[in-house]
Amino acid sequence: MPRSERSPLLLAGLLATAGVAHFARPRPFDAIVPRALPGTPRTWTYASGAAELALAAGLALPRTRKAAALSAAAFFVGVFPANVKMAWDWRHRPTPHKAAVLGRLPVQVPLVLWARAVAQGAGGRS
């Protein structure tokens, strides 16, 4: 399978894995939901997990790939505040933990760019 055909499926796999994790182990995700959001953290954890699963399904299907990829890019931007909250909450933890969460912050940029590249590769299909 050419790299351009694998890329959307790899991104779908990443999102599916993250989505399943939101349901299998929700507590760590609950802890990073910004308190300014209405409702309970668990509701947001499950909603974001469901969104990741839906995005993964959309990316896996060529017919919906472009729309799903653009939505994934927006999703990666939208969850960035949770990563910032986690970095802030962990500021007093040991250095390796702080380094891990701070290292997560710039990872959002390549994820957004990856999703945009998948959308461009999908061409006119949406």
Image (tube, grey):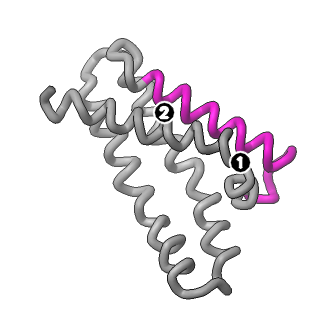
The Cα–Cα distance between marks 2 and 1, rounded to whole angstroms, is 23 Å
Identified at 86% across, 44% down, the residue is 39
Give the residue at mark 1: 26
Q: Which mark is residue 62?
A: none
Split into 4 quadrants, where in the image is the C terminus? top left
Picture coordinates of residue 125, whole percent (x, y): 31, 15
Name the element at disc 2.
helix
Q: Label 1 near label 2: C-beta < 8 Å?
A: no
Picture quadrant where residue 22 is located: top right
- Sequence-wise, the earlier of marks 2 and 1 is 1
Answer above or below: position of 54 versus 26: above
Picture coordinates of residue 43, whole percent (x, y): 79, 40
Give the residue at mark 2: 71
Q: Amino acid at mark 1?
A: Pro
Identified at 81% across, 59% down, the residue is 35
Q: Residue furthest right?
A: 39
Identified at 45% across, 22% down, the residue is 58
Label 2 neighbourhood size at 10 Å, few (<14), some (14-19), many (20+)? many
Q: Is residue 53 magenta?
A: yes
Q: Amino acid at mark 2?
A: Ser
Of residue 89 and residue 116, the one placed in the foreground of this image is: 89
Residues drawn in magenta: 34-58
